[in-house]
Amino acid sequence: MNSKKIIKEADVISKLEDFNRFVKEVFTLSFIQKLSPSYGISLEIDKHGKSKIDLNIPDDESIKAIVSDLRRFFQNGNDTLRIHKLQVYYQAKCIEVSERRFYGEVMSYLATFNSEPSRCEIENGRITNEKVWEVFMYGRFSHRSKGTKDVHDAWEKDKVMYAILKVEFVKVLIGYCNILSSLHALNKKIIDRLKQTITNF
């Protein structure tokens, strides 16, 4: 007997609508409103060797708020909004091949993006986007977990490198937002299509 759960159209619609509702909340946060297209870092060093660092990124409170929401989609764990948990719904018979393929491409892109090296080299190697995400999330903005906190605090001692890493962290947040935006659009397309095929939904 096949014990695999059959995912019905109504289940898919309900799941994708729930996911999209929380994605929309992410895009109402102040981080999005305060993010400048020319975000980044300006570094000046005077003739005495003193550095002046200007960061053109959203403030810490805005970053903290969006991290709190994004972690539900991207951190490891059992949150129902974790984007990996959409996979079972994208295997449903009502999902078209092209839709399933696009979801797979998004997930492949996420894996590639996470493994990409940042601009900072630490301990004779470049750290990945995923590492930057984890250290700032668990070491600064979401938790202060032992171990990760220590890594974050060690980074913070080098002001120039830390400023660059913080901009890299913002880059990761933007990357995650772009992934959510792609999934939101795909989900909406599927929802609209399926609703047309279901009467009295």
Image (cartoon, helix red, strand yellow):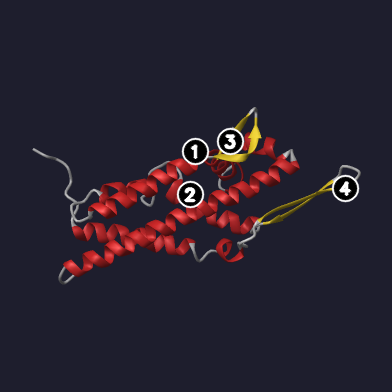
Select label 2 or label 1 by which is in front.
Answer: 1
Q: Residues within 10 Å of mark 4 (few under 14, many from 20)?
A: few
Q: Residue furthest front?
A: 98
Mark 2 or 1, nearer chain start? 2
Of mark 2 and mark 4, the one earlier in the sequence is: 4
Q: Image quarter for residue 119?
A: top right
Q: CA distance from mark 2 to mark 4?
A: 39 Å
What separation in Å lies between label 2 and label 1 (alpha carbons)?
Answer: 17 Å
The residue under label 1 is 115
Indicate which disc residue 71 carries: 2
**Local SS, label 4:** loop
Mark 3–mark 2 contact, CB under 8 Å?
Answer: no
Element on which disc 1 rests: helix
Residue 79 showing in the rendered view:
no
Q: Image point 68% across, 37% down: which residue? A: 155
Coordinates of residue 101 in the picture (x, y in percent)? 30, 49
Label 2 secondary element: helix
Q: Earlier in the sequence, mark 4 or mark 1?
A: 4
Q: Earlier in the sequence, mark 3 or mark 2?
A: 2
State which mark lies toward you, 3 or 2. 3
Q: Nearer the viewer, mark 4 or mark 3?
A: 4
